[in-house]
Amino acid sequence: MTPPELLSDKVLFPALQLGLMVLVVAAALIERRATPLDRQTHLRVTRAETSMKLYYGAYLALSGLLVALCLQVELARNHRVFWVLLDVALVSYLCIWNAWFRHLLQNLLAKARTVEVR
């Protein structure tokens, strides 16, 4: 394959979808491994408003990007509704429900807020 073919929709769209699915499975496995085996222990955390704005913002941005891609890519033409619903569901799981991914978002934001001193 030539470089232009590698950057085509027929290669990048399935790679993006597969990458998203792999990320969701990995996040679920990492979170499950981090959960204590003793399910009797319950910890309830109330998120601050700024944290929730971060999660909702990431959800909206990622969902918007993926929905736009699904609606534009010719490869998904006959199955657009399926791809849109799947992508929105996977992104909502990552940004709203998965603790590991939410912590990753928090860490990325913390790094973005720090100013590098030279």
Image (cartoon, grey):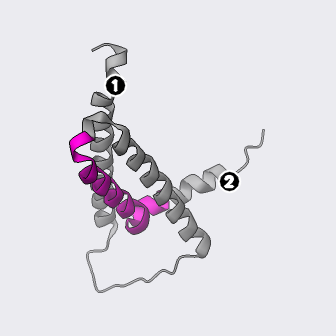
Label 1 environment density (alpha carbons within 10 Å; few <14, some 14–19, many ≥20): few
Q: Residues within 10 Å of mark 2 (few under 14, many from 20)?
A: few
The N terminus sits in image quarter: top left
Q: Which mark is residue 113?
A: 2
Residue toward you, 44 or 37: 44
Single out the mark in the foreground, 2 or 1. Answer: 1
Q: Position of residue 66 (x, y in %)?
A: 39, 47
Among the 4 quarters of the image, the one containing residue 92: bottom left
Dominant secondary structure of the residues highlighted in magenta in the image: helix
Name the element at disc 1.
loop
Residue type pointed to by label 2: Arg
| Element type at mark 2 | helix
First in sequence: mark 2 vs mark 1: 1
Q: Magenta part of the protein: which range?
A: 77-104
Which labelled disc corresponds to residue 8?
A: 1
Residue 89 visible from this viewpoint:
yes
